[in-house]
Image (spheres, rainbow, N blue to C red):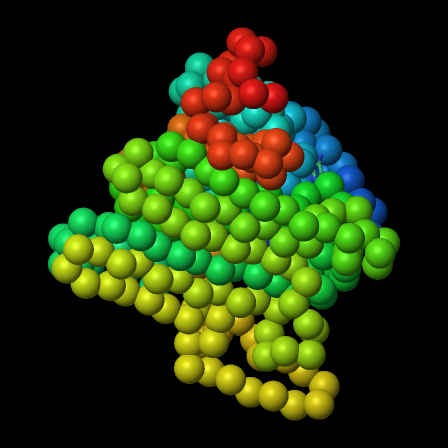
Amino acid sequence: MLTIGIVGAGLRGRLFAEALRDQPGVTVVGFAEPSDRVAEQARAATGLPVLPSHTELFSDLDPDAVIIATPDFAHRDAAIDAARGGRHILVEKPLATTLEDAHAIAEEVRAGGGRCLVGFENRWNPHVVKAHGSIARGELGAPITSSAVLSNSYFVPTQMLSWAGRSSPAWFLMPHTLDMLTWFIDSPVASVSAVVTDGILAARGVATSDVVHALVTFESGATANLTSAWVLPDGGQGIVDFRFELIGTAGSVSADLAHQGLTFVTDRSRSEWPLSGAIGRAPVGPAVWMVQQFAAALQDGGDLGPDVEHGLAITRAIRAVEVSAQLGRSVRVDELPAPGNAQGTP
Ligand SMILES: NC(=O)c1ccc[n+]([C@@H]2O[C@H](COP(=O)([O-])OP(=O)(O)OC[C@H]3O[C@@H](n4cnc5c(N)ncnc54)[C@H](O)[C@@H]3O)[C@@H](O)[C@H]2O)c1
């Protein structure tokens, strides 16, 4: 029996517990959650024990594997302690929001011997998987250029996330699209040129940026144009806008993942993300399939998905986006400081 502990009992932590409820050979042993209110919700929803900290979860319930579903800026401590104990880890994207945290986590995972999946859930998104398959088989020729939009309505930074002021569209949203296009193009990010705007959410009391645009050049020479904003109107058809296009030398692929042909509008509700909820008894959606593969692959030794080195590479590329926007010039990812070396563009 594989035992799993979940650190953070918020939206994602509870979704993961639900996704693993009927997984053969797997037991979710409990949560770590510092908020009494959220802990109570998690106990009521799942019947599982909820401990106040990850250290108590690890020492009292001793899980084989740990899912880290804390806010973007709070992955480090649980990831490092889990890795030191040799536990397997699923850590939500982004791996971290600072280079120091990302390098420290990667170092402990390398030393600890456990396996690590970084939660880039679009690897389990059916449209993305189909597009990747076609590109990987060479049906579209060599990738030339690509674009992706992943944006949220105001609901996300002002109501859904209590910690949006400690994240940004670059950290919360863009890792998804940068991971997806990096997977498609199969080449590391070489440099970025970015623009960030702010002021709208700050005026609503949330101290974060509003919009990020990044022009990305991959080492292969392919390019990408990424946009993420979390200032879409709440009166629209949903809280997520998600579209992509890739143009290759022999064809192209594009998708509108926000609607997927399903649109309904009433005076009181907005459209649901189509790949969510349950069909029959089975919870569905990319995050569900991701965590189920995590548990299955830990049991049978199969492929886990994007690892800590990839999570680190995406964190470094998003940091380059931030630095480029601050400096007002293009930034190469290899200009950023390497671990243990403070030299480089900050
Ligand atoms: N919500 C989404 O749609 C979504 C999608 C993909 C990925 N993610 C990622 O998942 C992670 C969690 O997001 P969420 O939406 O579940 O946030 P959330 O705010 O709903 O849940 C996070 C929980 O972690 C708890 N927490 C904070 N510090 C902790 C600590 N040190 N130990 C244990 N628990 C702690 C908080 O009290 C909170 O209950 C983030 O990194 C986010 O980017 C979220």
Q: How many marks?
A: 0
Furthest-bottom residue in view?
Answer: 266
Residue 178 vertical placement versus 246 (above, below): above
Quadrant position of residue 309: top left
Where is residue 264? Give x, y as percent.
55, 87
Which of these two is toward me, 177 or 55? 177
Residue 265 vertical placement versus 324 (above, below): below
Residue 308 vertical placement versus 342 (above, below): below
Furthest-front residue in view?
Answer: 329
Residue at the image position 71 percent from the left and 64 percent from the top: 154
Residue at the image position 45 percent from the left and 28 percent from the top: 333
Quadrant position of residue 18: bottom right
Taking 301 as reference, is 206 left or right?
right
Q: Is residue 326 visible?
A: yes
Where is residue 175? Give x, y as percent.
50, 45
From the image, which quarter does the N terminus lie in? top left
From the image, which quarter does the C terminus lie in? top right
Which of these two is toward me, 37 or 165? 165
Residue at the image position 51 percent from the left and 84 percent from the top: 263
Taking 345 as reference, is 333 left or right?
left
Which of these two is toward me, 321 or 67? 321
Residue at the image position 43 percent from the left and 38 percent from the top: 117
Taking 299 as reference, is 311 left or right?
right
Where is residue 189? Give x, y as percent.
38, 36
Where is residue 164? Give x, y as percent.
72, 49
Taking 338 as reference, is 139 left or right?
left
Q: Is residue 15 visible?
A: no
Which of these two is toward me, 69 or 98? 98
